[in-house]
Image (cartoon, rainbow, N blue to C red):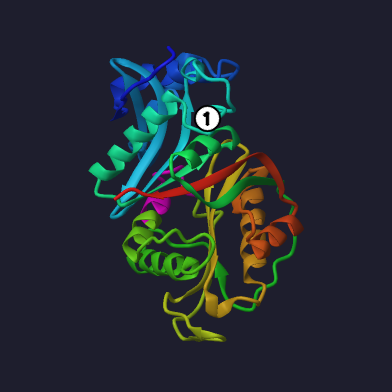
Amino acid sequence: MSALGDLQLRWAADEDAPAVARLSKEIDPDMDETQAGLAELFLHSPAEARRTMYLARQGDRPVARVRFKSAGELAWAWGIGWLPALEEGHRGPGWAAQDGTPAPALAGLVRALEAQARGAGARRLTVELLDPQVPAFAAAGYRPSKRRVEMAAPLVRRPVACDRPLRPPRPGDPAEREALARLLYEGYLGSVDQDGETEEVARAETVHVLDGEYAPFLAECSMVIEGDGGPAPAGPALSGLAGAALVLREGRSLSWLAELVVHRGFRGRGYGRALVQAAMNSSLDHGYEQMGLVVTLGNMPAEGLYRRLGFREEGEVQHHYVKEIA
């Protein structure tokens, strides 16, 4: 298969579970999970994980997979994988030809992704890439936004120092859900981790996390610091919360720090460290052995905090590239 042509990107429904599993094994034949096991994992994935899985097809044959979602004028694609046969016909790195132009296979997938995003009403598409995929996307007009990497640490119990009330969140309380949504929006606003999301998008993401739509939400391992809704040391605490650490379950022994945010009016008081350490202690209490997370490279305060708590880099760097597609 040396040329791809146009692809059709379609959402993967339940009946596509065997195709998702077969494609996953073809992409990575060394993975331990069987094809039947992969199909079961897909069918029992959290709701948001299943909603975002798409297959790129050439005719009736799935040849690539991608996670895709959109919200308003923004769209995101990640988890891109493809059949090795799609790389035939060129000798450059990844999907880029030696002269830097996209190989036919990649160009077809890029067109399909952009068509999907435009069809959803998006004007900007952000893609998450591994090293071999970067040159071809750059040649297709995408520009670098940020780089992220996974980190993990063994759970070690340490004392927690905090001068404000520190407790697990109450995900069933509508007022608390609203406070968390506002905290995540206000806390990330203007930071390296903010991708132009509106408050409505932040609210939707909070719902996905709290309702376990990415992975089971561990309220008992998560933590919030109360802000009392009053004036903060360096400005108004509009959300009513000074900070939060939201934790998901990624495996039998692995908890996952999905969100860590401290309101800008409460920074510099050690609340980030208190939240993470309290979440680590609680994860240990509930039988977990490790905690994982993703950090944006260049976010020096976050990187430094995680390293002091024992986190170390794992896996490949994830490159975020963006393109205006309107």
Q: Is residue 52 magenta?
A: no
- In the rendering, at what x and y percent does residue 34 appear? 52, 15
- In the rendering, at what x and y percent does residue 184 appear? 45, 65
Instruction: Give the camera-side residue of 108 and 175.
Output: 108
Q: Is residue 224 visible?
A: no
Alpha-carbon neighbours of circle 1 within 10 Å: few (<14), some, or many (≥20)?
many
Q: Residue at x 52, y 30 (%)?
A: 96
Q: Which residue is mark 1?
A: 96
75 with respect to 41 (left or right): left
- In the rendering, at what x and y percent does residue 163 appear? 64, 78
Q: In the orientation shown, which residue stands out farthest toward the top?
A: 1
Q: In the orientation shown, which residue stands out farthest toward the front?
A: 99
Q: Is residue 273 visible?
A: yes
Seen in the picture, residue 80 relative to 123 is either above or below; the reply is: above
Q: Is residue 210 magenta?
A: yes
92 with respect to 141 (left or right): right
Instruction: Give the camera-side residue of 214 and 169.
Output: 214
Seen in the picture, residue 316 relative to 98 is either above or below; the reply is: below
Q: Amino acid at mark 1?
A: Ala
Magenta range is 207-217
The answer to which image quadrant residue 140 occupies is: top left
313 with respect to 81 (left or right): right
Q: Residue at x 47, y 31 (%)?
A: 102
Seen in the picture, residue 53 relative to 191 is either above or below; the reply is: above
- In the rendering, at what x and y percent does residue 245 appear? 55, 60
Q: Callout 1: helix, strand or loop?
A: loop
- State the predominant SS element of the stretch in magenta: loop
Q: Residue at x 35, y 63 (%)?
A: 198
The answer to which image quadrant residue 106 occupies is: top left
